[in-house]
Amino acid sequence: MNQNVRIEPGGVNGIMAAPPSKSMMQRAVTLATLANGTSEISNPSFCDDSKAALGIARALGADVEENENCVKITGGIKPQGKGNVTVNCGESGLCIRMFSPIAALFDKEITLTGNGSLLSRPVGMIEEPLRALGAECKTDNGRPPVTVRGPMKGGNTRIDASTSSQFISGLLIALPLCPEDSKILVNNLKSRPYVEMTLELLERFGINIKHDDKLSEFNISGSQNYTPIHYTIEGDWSGASFLLVAGAISGSVSVTGLRASSLQADKAVLSVLKSAGAEIIMSDDSIYVGQNKDNLHSFEFNATDCPDLFPPLVVLACNCNGTSRITGVERLRHKESDRAAVLVEEFTKMGAAIKINENSIEVTGKKLAGDLVVDPHGDHRIAMACAVAALNATSGITIRNAGCIYKSYSRFFWDLKGIGANADYIMR
């Protein structure tokens, strides 16, 4: 979406509901598609990535009824159409890596493809494990599209999870439906919390998976059945982190709908805000973050398990005294953009003292410049980061092609405006 947004400097103050978690929405849609019966998903996400998951559910034979406050999915795992089937994953890395093992359940050739940046993201880790489990699989030299043909039978396989944990989630979802028992051995697991989110939801849908404490070995009984449930999507810590950082650097904000016991990796934003000196008050139904009357101070944080926090934490670091250090840069190379390089490029444009030092981004706090145009390079999280950064700039900042935020947080600019930001934008 080629829309530009201009954010003027100014404080924020208000209460805002967190967006629903797209990660949990995509997982819930997937599991409901495999269940025998009708599942109801309340507080649904309708961002572009979630819409992609709903489209795949339909393509795989599920009946999907969408309403503003609820999505009903009647499982029916029978791919639509004769001959080869092609499903579009949009720009969702989770969709293509998670649905590939599920597509391998069928005695039919299914091609998973997508749009934009997804076509350059790595999926080569899918091929050998699916072959070891009895399916055919090929990619375009390790990039999408992915073409699979089952039926996958189950068995033993080993996964290198250093690039992404999303394929593991897909296997954990698909293998319980295989006729044989399976064992997955995992090396170099990153983003452990996302695997834990999948396991939690699998249990809710009636699936039993045994694993060790390190999540390095999974033992999965075959011939299990998914049970339909009523599930409410929790608030999204990833999207809410931008609102929380806005409160810390430029006023105050209370965000409702965030589960304190959530397994989401990006809940770690609270510990960083606390270590930087922001005022935090937690209650049963909201989290308040306010600007410290004294100045915020620098922090160090390892974001290896929560790489989506890099953009909002770079904004926070720009507003802290001293030099902050965020490690885990290797996790940013294959996002919607080369996120580390784009963060450095665009924040340098705004006058930030930011650099990559081996596996970390280092930021020395200073006032950011305004009256300029930044380009998020199609990356939703960088667009949101630039918007929050503009709140404390010397003058307004224009974000080019800011519609990329629809990938994960469709209402972001509306919500930012709702807590007092001065935003001038063209509605979609």
Image (cartoon, rainbow, N blue to C red):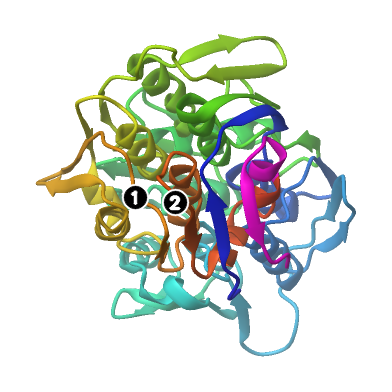
Q: Secondary structure at mark 1?
A: loop
Between 364 and 164, which is closer to the camera in this rendering? 364
Residue 49 quadrant? bottom right
Instruction: Give amino acid for label 2.
Output: Cys
Q: Nearer the viewer, residue 113 or 180?
A: 113
Compare residues 388 and 204 and report the one nearer the observer. Answer: 388
Where does the magenta region start and end? 415-428
**Image: 333 above or below 352:** below
Q: Position of residue 367 (x, y in %)?
A: 31, 39
Neighbor class of circle 2 (other Cα within 10 Å; few <14, some 14-19, many 20+) is many
Residue at mark 1:
369
Which residue does the image show at 80% across and 42% down from the upper left?
A: 228
Q: Is residue 366 above or below residue 2?
A: above
Label 2 close to label 1 by CB (< 8 Å)? no
Relative to 3, is 253 above or below? above
Can the viewer see residue 224?
A: no
Of residues 220 and 56, the one nearer the viewer is 56
